[in-house]
Image: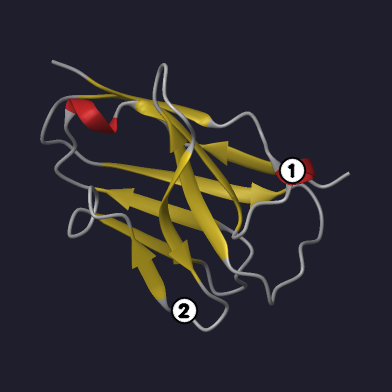
Amino acid sequence: QVQFVESGGGLVQPGGSLRVSCAPSGSVFSKWSRAWYRQAPGKQRVVVATITPDGAQDYADSVKGRFTISTDSSKNTLYLQMNDLNSEDTAVYYCNTQPPRMEYWGKGTQVTVSS
């Protein structure tokens, strides 16, 4: 059973930066688009950034210009570089395919932006 494993979250001050990573526990079809999602307390999980197999990127308006999605050369590990963080970015961050596959959801990584 393949799952994505997220890491790199933590506590960061407003205006700070953080990079989170995600890798599958097994083989994932490389031709699928992948995405970062986040779920803030009391809110639904939403997509924040998407990358296609060809490298095309798309971002939610709330993170555009601040977040960058990327993969390593093998396209196995997915990254999300987050800059100029603010309190509204506080959430659990998950990765998955886009559209997401239910069986691939991992536990996520908590990102907390607070002074």
Residue located 37% across and 67% down the image: 58
Residue located 56% across and 32% down the image: 108
Compared with residue 72, is residue 22 higher up or lower down, i.e. above or below? above
The image quadrant that residue 75 belongs to is bottom right
Specify the label residue 55 is tagged with.
2
**Can residue 65 be seen in this snapshot?**
yes
Residue located 32% across and 52% down the image: 81
**Can residue 10 be seen in this snapshot?**
no
Q: Is residue 97 left or right of residue 50?
A: right
Secondary-structure class at tag 2: loop
Specify the label residue 46 is tagged with.
none
Dot 2 or dot 1: first in sequence order is: 2
Residue 15 rendering spot, x and y as whole percentages = 10, 36
To which residue does mark 1 refer?
102
Residue 53 rendering spot, x and y as whole percentages = 57, 78
Disc 2 packing (10 Å; few <14; some 14–19; many ≥20) = few
In front: label 2 or label 1? 1
